[in-house]
Amino acid sequence: MAQHSLSAHFGYFFSRLNPSPSFEAQASSEYNTIKGLIENPNGLAAALRPKCFLQGSYRQQTAIYTINDVDVVALCDLTLGGPPTPPQFGSPIWTRDAIFDTVAAPLLNDGRYCHRVRYNPSSMCVKVDLGIKVEILPVVYKAEHYPDDSKEPFVLYRPERFRWEDGYAQYHQWWLSNKNAHPQVSGTFIPMVKVLKHLRSLHRVDAVSFHLECLLFQVIDQVYGGSPSEYICRVLNHLAVIDVADWYRMTIYTPCGDRDIFTAAEWSWLSWTEFHRQVRQWAAIACAASNATDRQTAVRLWQNLLGADYFPAYA
């Protein structure tokens, strides 16, 4: 049990972490405009009958500070009046380049976006730089799921491996929301994702947001719950007390179970060891702050961990 919950202090801290309504409004406006162009049944992408939906930190409500990017999935229909033709089996019409060109065409034809669209043969996404970066990921149905756009995986192009592979977006979001809603977690999982992303950014540690989500997802539910003073200490300590090599020997699957994040291609050993070293330091400070009997000492320690600009001396 934390000695001082510091509810008002943490309330201010999370208000600083959460993107302001103006960023939310801009992201929503840009998404809806681009979605309308791509999905237009009479537009330049109509041959693919694309359906757009959000993925990433904006959709999952794990964005911090500002909304720097909006990740959009454009689910494309390759039926052409017949059964779906997965592109990895060869399609004389819908090659990877043809799909990307068709999805990008409505944007390239619009004066607001034509000079801001970027992609090439090795791109994972079609990028639109609007201050807020919009990244559009063209994907196609798996044959067995067509035409149900709620079923995953879909198929996406991996340029680093020059092949089409299974991918998830909506299921990933469902798993994160489901964990956050678990009675033992009590809505503290999403805030903890934001805390860990903040610590990563504040202390300039190399770690991908998606990997942080996957790592925290695998932390048992019993570690969550309670006040921020309690769950931040418990979660960081849980990550810290397991040896760095023991962690890496585990198979830490993504929430959808499609791949292990502890591989050289995902989270390298060197990057993980540096991250774990920092976590051990963060855990020591957080637990000292949580257990401090003196309120002023607790505040000072939380400021050392979370940054004095984010965690106020008085609230």
Image (cartoon, rainbow, N blue to C red):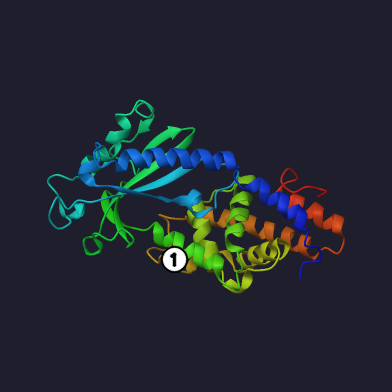
Q: Residue at x 60, y 53 (%)?
A: 194
**Above or below, comparing residue 106 to residue 162 in the picture:** above
Amino acid marked by disc 1: Tyr
Q: Badge 1: how crowded within 10 Å, few (<14), some, or many (20+)? A: some
x, y percent for residue 104: 30, 37
Q: Residue at x 35, y 33 (%)?
A: 118
SS for callout 1: loop
Residue closest to the eye, 180 or 111: 111
Residue closest to the eye, 111 or 279: 111
**Above or below, comparing residue 181 to residue 86 in the picture:** below
Residue 71 visible, this angle: yes
Q: Which residue is mark 1?
A: 253
x, y percent for residue 223: 63, 71
Image quadrant containing the N terminus: bottom right
Residue 203 visible, this angle: no
x, y percent for residue 236: 64, 62
- Marker count (numbered): 1
Image quadrant where residue 232 sits: bottom right
Residue closest to the eye, 9 or 243: 9
Left or right, 9 with reference to 156: right
x, y percent for residue 72: 39, 46
Q: Residue at x 82, y 48 (%)?
A: 313
Left or right, 95 with reference to 293: left
